[in-house]
Amino acid sequence: MKLFELGQITMTPSAISIIASFKVPIGELLDRHERGDYGEVSEVDWRENTLALLPESVERVMSVYNVGNQKLWVITDPDRKVTTLLTEADF
């Protein structure tokens, strides 16, 4: 069950590189993210994601997935208009 809207999907060049290198099924990752399978986030981030789903929330939703020896972040903005895939190199 989808918990929130993803909006427009954007990716940084480093995320595109990892996705291409490891042949990541992007649709599956996005499905996991919007169903509440946040991957390898901390307990604190998991709780923040849960609170971000409340109607009055103005917080982002964040997932972290291991891809090979890299991490891929999926972040949906608070207004749910944009979801961005990025890597540690982008921080």
Image: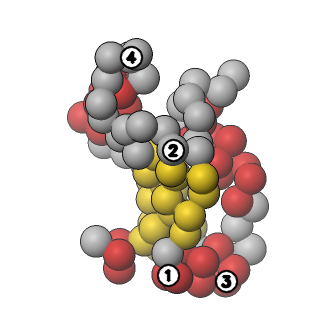
Residue 69 at least partly seen: no
In the picture, which quadrant includes the C terminus? bottom left
Name the mark on residue 14: 1
Q: CA distance from mark 1 to mark 3?
A: 10 Å
Q: CA distance from mark 2 to mark 4?
A: 16 Å
Q: Amino acid at mark 1?
A: Ser
| Residue pictured at 70% horizontal, 67% vertical | 24
Q: CA distance from mark 3 to mark 4?
A: 36 Å
Name the mark on residue 21: 3
Considering only order in the chain, which callout, 4 or 3, is on the residue closer to the N terminus?
3
Q: Which residue is mark 2?
A: 81
Considering only order in the chain, which callout, 4 or 1, is on the residue closer to the N terminus?
1
Q: Amino acid at mark 3?
A: Ser
Crowd class of label 3 (few under 14; some 14 to 19; many from 20; radius 10 Å): few
Q: CA distance from mark 2 to mark 3?
A: 28 Å
| Residue pictured at 41% horizontal, 45% vertical | 77
Considering only order in the chain, which callout, 3 or 2, is on the residue closer to the N terminus?
3
| Residue pictured at 35% horizontal, 79% vertical | 89
Q: Amino acid at mark 4?
A: Leu
Q: Which residue is mark 4?
A: 54
